[in-house]
Amino acid sequence: MSERWDAAPDEDPARPVPDGPEETSNDVEPDTTASIGTEDVLDAEPVPVADTKPPLAGKRARRSPWNRTRDRAFAAAIVALVAVTGVVIGVNSDSAATVTQVAATLPPGLPPAPAQVPGSLTELWHAPSSATPSPIGEANSVVTAEKGEVLGRDPYTGDVRWRYSRDLELCTVALAGIKVDAVYRKDTGCSEVTQLDTGTGRRTAQRNGDAELGTRLVVDGSHVTTTGKKLLNTWRDDLVKSMEYGQVPAIVNANKQPRTGCTYGTVAAAAGKIGVIERCPGDPADRFSVYRATNDEADDPKVDYSTVLAGKNAKVVAMSGDLALIALPEQKLLVIYGGDGTQKSAYPLDVPAADLAQDPEGGIMTTAWTAQGVYWFTGSKTMAFSRDDLTPRWSLNSSAGPGVTFGEQLVVPIKGGLAVLDELSGTTVRTVGIDRRGYNGPVQLSSVGPVLLEQRGPTLVALK
């Protein structure tokens, strides 16, 4: 059953060419990467002319120091050592332990989703995918990720079209625009990041980072932020780091971070800004800070505002434009903050205390977005908000996850199936039964063409 909300306030010329024939080669292409004519280069010193006169009669020519057997053997040993070292490095390098199988062609097109959710849905296939917190369907492919392997699959059959695998453990994988960002664990953190084309599996970018174990990815337009308890890193869509916030591992410029000693709770992002719940020594309650995803220097955050909230155990649920939606469990309130850091409005929060007792895994609240709304799964119910101003609309009790649009209708996972709802009012239009084979945990939804995807814990299931 759904409850309707009643809103309260508020980037030279050529140099002279020496006389003489120009040397050419059919084997080496010209270096087109060097830039000449714009750099002030000193003229090279004249090369001394070699003495070509024959040695004086009666005098023996000097023997080359490398003609002795001992010297030749020594040189051969050096060559052999270098060759062996190269083999050892190659065998133990990251690339030697990487398997890349790229799709020869782009996947075929898919028909659109039906205008109305079908009356019944049947499982097409399922696959392990514990590294994807939510289903990934994009570019007519479904992406699964397990252990150290990221796979692009046919939506109808689950057949593998492309593969990217490393002998490292995956931390998390998420869809960032039309690419897939795969974060791998190395040593003590989640530091190896590879970006893949969703349709072909072609590697498009790669970087090293400083993300913490347990990190998740917060995606906002052209930026991605890694979560953590002491450090947040933000990249552009080409994986170039644009900002870091918190306890920076290798400090280059001191006193750039606004606060030290704080730990972080939940994180959200919107409109090129990142919002984070901070718990800092000396503060009487939790703090909410909003900073820019970019600045002149990547270690110098530009903070829009930072305000101490009314209570502890706060959660940032979502951000939209300059607005931020904060849950205050102790006060049983939902509070909306404006771009200047002032409270704009507040609404009653009616959820079981157990739903918000702990910060969610990875520091991201379980939400989903449609063209019209934002849907938050609290753990026991789904709450709907306006995408434009984050005001509450309605709530659905006894749900299993947030809602998404499939075709032209809103669907929300419930126990035993799906509820098809009117998006504005939350009224249940009808329900669709699904046999989840004994799985009773949270469910996250996505779709690609006419195929509906369910993330059931560590397993991804395709339905049609």
Image: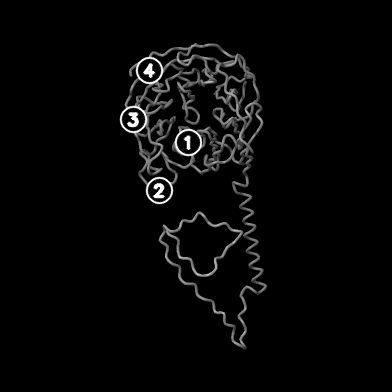
Residue 307: mark: 3
Give residue 70's position: percent from left, percent from top: 66, 72
Q: Kindly report which numbered mark, 1 or 3, lies closer to the viewer in this rendering.
A: 1
- Give, as a three-letter code, the residue at label 2: Val
Mark earlier in primary sequence (1, 3):
1
Residue 226: mark: 1
- Give, as a three-letter code, the residue at label 1: Thr
Q: Which residue is mark 2?
A: 252
Q: Is residue 103 above or below residue 327?
A: below
Mark earlier in primary sequence (1, 2):
1
**Cα gap from disc 3 to disc 2, whole angstroms:** 28 Å
Mark earlier in primary sequence (3, 4):
3
Tag 3's secondary structure?
Answer: strand
385 sits left or right of 341 in the view = right
CB under 8 Å between callouts 1 and 2?
no
Q: Which residue is mark 4?
A: 347
